[in-house]
């Protein structure tokens, strides 16, 4: 049995807390929001973000960050990506040398273009940082619906240790050393999911969705491999797998926000309606910063940025994508002489 703290009591943190408890571990859940912790203590259910998923009576809930961090075997960092740096900074004094932190949020920091694991390593250099990602909606994991994910870590023994902690009969865990590829797939798929939602909001159909998913993973892989990620990662669970589920499911806050934008709402109105952090909005600008840095074309993500931040209409953005210069689908495949 491991002593584990979940840092962040949103839907994903809550679902993972229940999963780990059912695996036989001692679980503490931390939130900075006093009202949230009081609700969890009283109701043993996150009424707002994960309704219907009951938490055990002996699970520990706290707002004391020092108590949540000190001496734990594993820290699962589950705060929304805009709060990764500030939370890591506050955790740092209590993290011991070699303590394992598993980041489960998805995003890229706009100002530095750091992935979330790079932010954690920047603020907590003494920690052993890993990531957990894949096609895994909290609403389904909380209900015990079969799910497969990937743990990424630079050291194989750390990845195998976490694999044993998280894996059970309904939560299959693979491991990978490609932490960068996993994180890029996780962050950039949220931007493409916004595009998929926008297309849904415009009333487009399955053909459009398939095109966005297929060309979206091509963009993600093009940038990811230029940065040093592995092609195989983008073909796997944390690449195309996560992209499919995020573009197709109404559990996806990014898709839901995109639908509202496609229907004519502003970005701010869409985010307010979804009532959760829409990670793709925060990663969109950073993705274009990375595209410029690595000289990579990201036409779908570029159009999402223009809709979000430059006032371009969703219909105009689709027209811009459809009327781009003629291309070969895969220039690496040779023609016969």
Image (tube, rainbow, N blue to C red):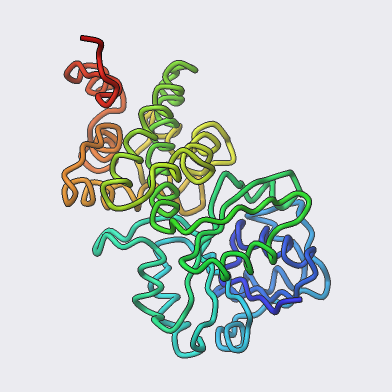
Residue 56 sits in quarter: bottom right
**Position in image of residue 115 (x %, y %):** 36, 61
- The extreme top residue here reads 337
How many numbered marks have been drawn onto this rendered protein structure? 0
Question: Compared with residue 213, is residue 60 higher up or lower down, i.e. above or below?
Answer: below
- Give me the residue at 38% from left, 45% from top: 188
Q: Residue at x 54, y 66 (%)?
A: 156
Quarter holding the N terminus is bottom right
The residue that appears at 59% across and 85% down in the rendered structure is 64
Q: Is residue 208 visible?
A: yes
Which residue occupies the foreground of this view, 68 or 122?
A: 122
From the viewer's side, name the closer residue of 234 and 213: 234
Residue 173: x and y in percent read 64, 54
Where residue 132 sits in the image (x, y, percent)?
A: 54, 58
Residue farthest front in this picture:
337
Which quadrant, please, contains the C terminus?
A: top left
Between residue 327 and residue 228, name the one nearer to us. 228
- Name the residue at the right extreme: 57
Q: x%, y% of residue 138?
A: 63, 51
169 or 319: nearer the eye? Answer: 169
Taking the image as shown, residue 188 lies to the left or right of residue 140, namely left
Visible residue check, residue 263: no
Is 129 placed left or right of 57 in the picture? left
């Amino acid at each position: 049995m491991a002593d584990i703290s979940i840092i962040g009591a949103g839907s994903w943190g809550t679902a993972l807390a229940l999963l780990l408890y059912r695996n036989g571990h001692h679980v503490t859940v931390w939130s900075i929001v006093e009202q949230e912790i009081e609700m969890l203590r009283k109701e043993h259910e996150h009424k707002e973000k994960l309704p219907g998923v009951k938490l055990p009576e002996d699970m520990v809930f706290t707002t004391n960050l020092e108590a949540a961090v000190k001496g734990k075997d594993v820290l699962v960092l589950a705060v929304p990506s805009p709060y990764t740096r500030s939370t890591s900074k506050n955790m740092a004094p209590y993290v011991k040398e070699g303590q394992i932190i598993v980041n489960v949020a998805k995003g890229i920091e706009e100002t530095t273009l750091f992935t979330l694991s790079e932010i954690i390593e920047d603020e907590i250099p003494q920690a052993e940082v890993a990531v957990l990602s894949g096609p895994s909606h909290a609403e389904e994991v909380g209900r015990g619906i079969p799910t497969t994910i990937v743990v990424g870590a630079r050291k194989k023994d750390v990845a195998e240790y976490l694999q044993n902690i998280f894996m059970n009969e309904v939560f299959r865990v693979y491991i990978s050393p490609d932490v960068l590829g996993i994180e890029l797939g996780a962050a950039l798929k949220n931007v493409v999911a916004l595009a998929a939602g926008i297309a849904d909001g415009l009333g487009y159909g399955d053909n459009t969705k398939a095109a966005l998913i297929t060309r979206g993973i091509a963009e993600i892989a093009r940038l990811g491999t230029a940065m040093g990620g592995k092609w195989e990662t983008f073909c796997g669970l944390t690449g195309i797998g996560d992209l499919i589920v995020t573009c197709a499911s109404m559990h996806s806050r990014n898709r839901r926000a995109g639908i509202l934008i496609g229907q004519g709402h502003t970005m701010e109105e869409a985010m307010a309606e979804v009532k959760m952090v829409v990670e793709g909005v925060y990663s969109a600008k950073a993705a274009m910063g990375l595209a410029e840095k690595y000289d990579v074309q990201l036409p779908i993500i570029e159009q999402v940025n223009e809709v979000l931040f430059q006032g371009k209409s969703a219909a105009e953005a689709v027209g811009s994508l459809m009327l781009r210069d003629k291309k070969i689908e895969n220039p690496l495949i040779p023609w016969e002489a």
